[in-house]
Amino acid sequence: MALESNENADKFILKFESMLKTDDVYFFDAEDFEGIVHHYLNLGKVALGKKAIKIGLQQHPNSIELKLLRVEVLVFEDHFTQAETLLDELQTIATNNEEIFIQRANILSKQDDHQGAITMLMQALHMAEDSFDIHSLLGMEYLFIDDFEKAKKNFMKCLEYDQSDYSSLYNVVYCFEFLEDFDGCIYFLNEYLEKNPYCEVAWHQLGKMYDHKDLLTEALAAYDFAIISDESFLGAYFEKGKILEKLGKYNEAIESYETTIAMDDPTSHAYLRIGKCHEKLGNDDLAKYYYYNTVHEDPLLDKGWLAITEFYTRQKDYGKAQYYINKAINIDGENPLYWKKSAKIFLAQKDYSEADFAFKQAVDLGNYELDSWQDWANVLQQLEDYESAVQVLLQGLEFYPENAEMSYQLSGLYLKTNQIDLAKEKLHTALQLNTEKQVFFKKKFPEYANLKWIKDSFSNDSKAST
């Protein structure tokens, strides 16, 4: 009985390894050496691959394919000059070998000359009979230069050659997403599914596109089809659960998430979503149970610690909320979200000194959200540290120059620090931004609301607006 191709490959590899151990010399065809080299390179055993190339070229010194494999290894090890020299020699012998241009493209790509790599791949494309791999390489090069339209077209070509090339399918969807062409992606995926109706990957991606468009019923149907196509597709169950949550069908969402836990090792994300659903249903004890399981499963998942913290914050149990956010900070003290949440809990307890420290940490770590600046300034105002509050608001206005409330507050703080001209300037700016927010100033600084120039400013602005 003749050996199957994979049996042949195994036989030649065993024979080659036996040769290495015994120092005996066995003869192999050039094609056999190619198979042996590919085997080792695919396994990441580069040293054995190089050994096979060396022995192969000793037995077959004119083998172009083995020399090209040598080039591939040289490029992998960043020996570009040697690789180029060998390619120059090969090109004089085999002028129309597309692999020479593919390897030249590989060198240029590794040197960040992606446009040059594209030029080489286009030349290879003109010579190749089977251009599947070249289109895939072109798609990746176009991704490197952010030409998502051309990348998409090349990955689509790959799908024309092989409908089951899911790597190219994902890349096509990625290009559509980056171009924010969700309608185009939906059309493409529906066309693809006409030819491949049981492709769970395409159904899953279609569900995500419908979700982007807020077409929740359609998204749910797509995930159901993904599950019909592959009942073990965990990602489809999880995404289906998220859609059911958005539709307010929390019990059904829990069932979908629990399916993922039953089918595979439980994940922190599944526990977190189940906890959120139970909290929405008013099942506080179950919500806590799943939140605790979330952080037990993955202590570094910030969403888990924040969920527990927010759970107790909503119950106004600030002691426990502070305890759990402190645990999170002890695990990852560089997380600005933890510090911001800590600051807000201290603020709710009117512990302004601790809130000031926590807000400073959050901002220093990169949290520049509007409410962070506003709340921090309010804390400093409560501490009567008006100069620091001014500096915080000035920083905040660099990020949100159109925010009227910060300008009104700055005006009041300048009054607190006897900087009347700056107070007038900021009040004028605030009124230009939003005259209706005058009430914010009056509530924040009632002691100044009846000053004549302020009343005149408000009155003049009201007349101007009418």
Image: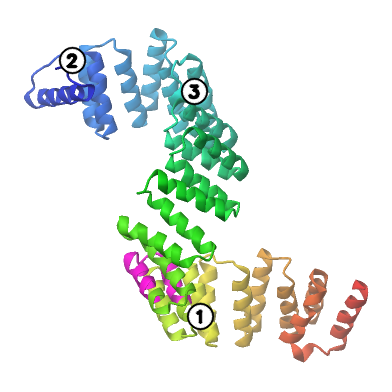
If the image is split into quadrants, where does the N terminus sit? top left
Look at label 2 and name its amino acid: Phe
Q: Position of residue 456 (x, y in %)?
A: 89, 83
Name the N-terminal-most of marks 2 and 1: 2
* Residue type (three-letter) at the residue carrying disc 1: Arg
Q: Quadrant of the C terminus?
A: bottom right
Residue highlighted by disc 2: 28
Q: Residue at x 40, y 81 (%)?
A: 323
Q: Which SS class for mark 2?
A: loop
Q: Nearer the viewer, residue 398 or 182?
A: 182
Name the element at disc 1: helix
Quick check: 65 left or right of 186?
A: left
Q: Residues within 10 Å of mark 1 (few under 14, many from 20)?
A: few
The verdict on residue 292 being magenta is yes
Residue 350, how many percent across, how many down?
55, 88
322 left or right of 353 in image: left
Mark 2 and mark 3 lie on one chain; the one further toward the N terminus is: 2
Residue 458 relative to residue 379: left or right: right
Instruction: Using the rendered view, name the quadrant where residue 409 is placed.
Output: bottom right
| N-term-proximal mark, 1 vs 3 | 3
| Residue 89 falls inside the magenta stretch | no
Task: Report the residue marked by disc 3.
Answer: 121
Q: How is the image coloured?
A: rainbow
* Nearer the observer, 142 or 456: 142
Q: Is residue 41 above or below residue 323?
A: above
At 57% across and 38% down in the image, what residue appears?
146
Q: Which residue is mark 1?
A: 314
* Residue 389 relative to residue 158: left or right: right
